[in-house]
Structure formats: C-alpha cells, structure tokens
Image: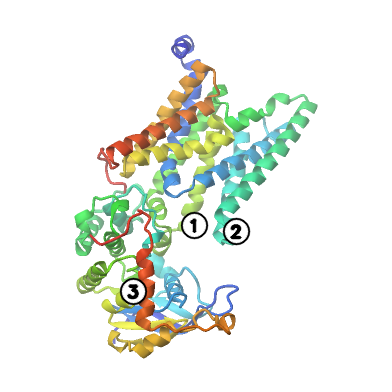
Amino acid sequence: MPSPAVEFSGVTFQYPGAPAPALDNVSLTVNAGERLGVLGPNGGGKSTLLKLMLGLIEPTAGSVRVCGMPPRSARAAGVIGYVAQRADAELSMPLSVREIVTLGAAWRVPPWSAVPTAARARVQRMLELTGADAFADKPIGKLSGGQLQRAMIARALAADAKVLALDEPTVGIDAAGQKLFAELLARVHAELAVTIMVVSHDLRAVVAGSDRVACLARRLHSHTSPQGLTPQVLAELFSHDVAGLSGVLAGMHVHAHAPSECCEHEHARADRTPTTQGTPRADA
Amino acid sequence: MQTLEHLREFGWSGFLVLALLAGLSVVAMCGVLSVLVVVKKLGFVGQGVSHSAFGGVGLAALLAALGWLPDSPIAQLAVVVLFCVGSALGMAAVSDRRTVPVDTAIGMFLVGSMALGAVLTHIAQAVAAERGRSGIVQSWEAILFGSILTANWSDVLVGWVVCIAVLLCAWWFRRPMLFWAFDEDSAAAFGVPTRFTKTLLMILLALAIVVAMRLAGVVLATALLVLPGAAALKLSDRFWTVTILSVSIGVLGLCIGLVASFELSWQPGPCVVLAMTILFALSAVWARIRGGGSALATPAAV
C-alpha cells in the first residue's frame, strides 16, 4: 500500500468571528507520487486547505500530516514546494529567473558560503525540466504568465520538495498556455514522481493533470477520478451554499449555474484581470 | 570656488570634510536598503519611521534637559533608535493583525509621534532654559531639515559604526531577505522565517533613518531611502548593478548637494535631496531613451 504524502483527518477550521467553518470535517489522503486535483468554487475552503497543509494556520479540530510530519515541521524541512497565485510576487525585483530558482534551492546556505555545485546543478536540471532554461537569464519582471509559472515551478522543485502544491495555477493563462501547463505537470510527474496537488476553481486545470479529483465546498463532496466528475457532481459542487449565506440570501432567487457555465464565467473573468506588467499575459 | 578654497585652507579638519564623511556613511547604507524599500513599496513605512524619530528626539531632549541622560550624541542616538525601532515594530504589528489598514496604521504612528515630539521638545526647551542648559536642545529647523554641517568626529564615527553594522547584517541575511522581498507568501511556505526577516528589515530601516536624520532631518530622511533605489532601478534590472548604482547615485547626490549648499549658502539637507531628485529625473529620462535593461554585467545575486 503506498504511503501517504499528505493526510487530512477530520479537519475542521473556522476563522475567528466567521459564522460557519471554512472547512467542515474534511478527511483526505494524498498518496506519495499521486496527482490530486482539488476542485471547488471560490470561498469553498481550497486556500484554507492549502494554508493548513503549509502549517500557516492550525485546524480547529482534526489533524494534518505532511510526509508523516506536522505541517510546520514539514515546512521547516523544506518538503513542500508551493507555487502561489502569481499576483503575490514583487515582479519589479531586479533578479533573473536563475537567481529566483537558486533562492529556492539555496536560501538556507550559510551566508559565508557560495551556493554549492550540487545545488547549482539541481537548479539547472529543474530549469531544463520546466523549459525555463530558455529564459533563465531574463529578469523575472519581463516574463509572460506561462514563463513565470514555469519559473515558479522550477523554484519549488529546485528546493527538492516532495509535495508540489499549486494554488490556482491557470488564473490569467490562455487556453494554449493551459495545455502547455498540463504537459509540464505530466513531464515533472513522470521525471521526478513528486506528489502534486493542484487547487483550483477551474475545471480544466484540475482535470488535465490529476489522477484523482477531490470536490471541496466546505465539506468534501466527492473524491473521484476525473472521469467520475459527472454533471450532477459538478452541479452540486458549484451551487453549494459555501459561505453559509442562505440566511442572508433568503427571499432572493438564486440560480445554480450549470457547472461548465460557472467555470467558464470565472475563467473569463480571470483572463481579463490586468497583470502587474500592464499587458495581457500569454504563454511564450 | 569657495569649496576648493575651504578644502585647501582647512583640509581634513574642515567642517565640509566632516559633513562629507558623515554623509557618506548615510548614503552607503541607505543606498543598499533603498533597493528593498522601493521594490517592497516601503517608502511610506520609511516616512512613518522617520517622523516617529521626531518623538524620539523630543524624548531624548527632555531626558537630557532633566539631566537623566548624559549630554552625549551616542546616548541621545540610542534613545531615538529605540523609539524608532519601537514605532517600526508597532506599525508592523498593527498592520499584520489586519484590523487596521497598513497606511492607516503608519499614519497613526506618524502623526502621534510628531505630536508627541512637538510637545516633548517644547517642554524640554522650557526645562533647559530654566536650568540654564538651553544649548543641549536642538533647534526645530535642525530636527526637521538636518544639520550635517555641524557634524563632528563623534558623529562620523557613530555614522560609520551603524553603517557597517547595517551592511553586515543585510549581507548576512541576504538570501532569506531577497526571498522574502520577492515573494512573501511563498517564502513562508518554503520555511523562510518571514516574521523575523520583516522585523530585521524594520530595525535596519530604523537605524538607517536615525543616522540619515543628521543629514536630511526628519522631513527629508525618507528621500535618502527612496530616491537612490528608484533611480538605480530605472537604469538596470540586475541586483548587484542596481545596488552599486543606488549607492553611487547617493554618493553623487551627496557631493553635489553639499557643494551646492556651501557655494549658495543654502540648507545642506534640502540641497542633497534636491540633487538626488534631479539624478532620479535624469535616470528616468535615460531609461526612456535607452528602453531599460542592464548594460553592465555583475555576478549572480544569490
């Protein structure tokens, strides 16, 4: 039986002052080397799940283990490679792609030491694996959306992470870029056999690169293969009352979007989001 | 030219040389920190800390007037540094809780410290006059706009000790600091001690600002932390090139400002800041003509 890379056991989390828990009794296991997609609407607890896994917040009830360790220990040990939504990064930083990726591999190197040759070799290998070697000496602020995403994945892998967690990886990336992204994840998985968790509200992003899909809307609704995502499952997931707003919305006529319509709508909105560069992003 | 005549006449003991040596310590550390300040958009934080220093100056003046603090620049500097570090950490703590917006938190500390500084300086002047020690309280103008032309060897020594300490600390923690500065949320996920790194940068900024106040005063100290980095980032996108350019622009602005101040009999602090502002404008024009990018090759930042 494969060993679990990430284990959520009966996890409940409620933000202080919130009327309802963001996550309610979620149990989920991701086996080592598995690719899991976590699909859910905005406000469904996906980011909370990631924060719990990273040890940035503690569960109200239940427990989380990453590679057999509490999340904080796993984070300190560097076993989690996290790729955030790219809006978080300071793209005016005068650093090249190679320097950013090297930081992932070598930020713990003592200040008096140069970056070890082994770490530099690993950086080069991850740049090549992700295809970021073609623009390794470019400043980080001059990349397209797809290039930046590859650089961030290379940084996570260069840190020798056992679990690669990607938060909304396809936001603002066009259809061609999404296809390249799915191919990249497949290549990384085949080459390194790393555990991959893709968390997104975008059905295509989750289905394209996953062995299993966990549908999350405060509770775990289903836990199935991508083929098991029937229209009924998606309809229930995306029309779920995730924020406990039924009282507020009482009396209002609320349409439950058809799942594909919901995803398309969210995606189109994300695609229109202006970038920090002031230009629309497209994959190179 | 008066400047050359002064240098010929007084040599190393002239006040212009002392001002230059004290100023160089300030622009060296501010030039390095400036790159992070601009990239992390901490200009307003710098403004908040430098104005907080006004409260620290008032407190130090009152303690000195009462005779509870030795009449030495190092003792007074220590009080101001502690006050600024406290304010910087307070701003960071209040903004981290996210119950108050960051700019509101900074604004509160800024005006609160300014008001406290004004009241304490007023009381200190009255107490000092009563006890016949008027000379120990700085004038309002010196506090607000700096008085580098009155720098002595102990000011130069303090400036360089603080400068070397700040630069060593920044070099020692360069890797986690760069990681944090580029991508704060991801840095935490990678295990970078983000809270420690942020606190450390706040302390370094507070130290730099307190020493910069001697040159440019409370009002203009932030300019030394913003203008060199902003100008350098217009000229290059390579980290070490930007850092070297930032320090060079600071040094050039200091020299031009001091000479202009001496020749024209204007206040030195505003002259230095104006010189740096002009250098920033020239850098922006040059970047527009060249189309950005780096012309100089430097080693990797990491």
Q: Position of residue B248 (x, y in %)?
A: 37, 32
Residue under label 1, please give it.
B195
Q: Are marks 2 and 1 on the same chain?
A: yes
Please give the name of the residue rendered at 53% of the width and 46% of the height, measured from the top-left corner.
Answer: B44
- In the image, is B135 to the left or to the right of A126? right
Q: Position of residue B35 (x, y in %)?
A: 41, 43
Q: In the figure, A66 relative to B277: above or below? A: below
Name which quarter of the figure residue B110 lies in.
top right
Q: Position of residue B235 (x, y in %)?
A: 33, 38
- In the image, is B108 to the left or to the right of A62? right
Secondary structure found at label 3 = strand
Q: Mark 1 belongs to which subunit? A: B
Amino acid type, callout 1: Arg
Disc 3 crowd, CA 10 A, few/some/many (<14, 14-19, 20+): many
Residue under label 2, please give it.
B100
Name which quarter of the figure residue B49 lies in.
top right
Please give the name of the residue rendered at 57% of the width and 22% of the height, measured from the top-left corner.
Answer: B150
Q: In the figure, B9 relative to B120: above or below? A: above
Amino acid type, callout 2: Val
Disc 1 crowd, CA 10 A, few/some/many (<14, 14-19, 20+): some
Residue under label 3, please give it.
A198
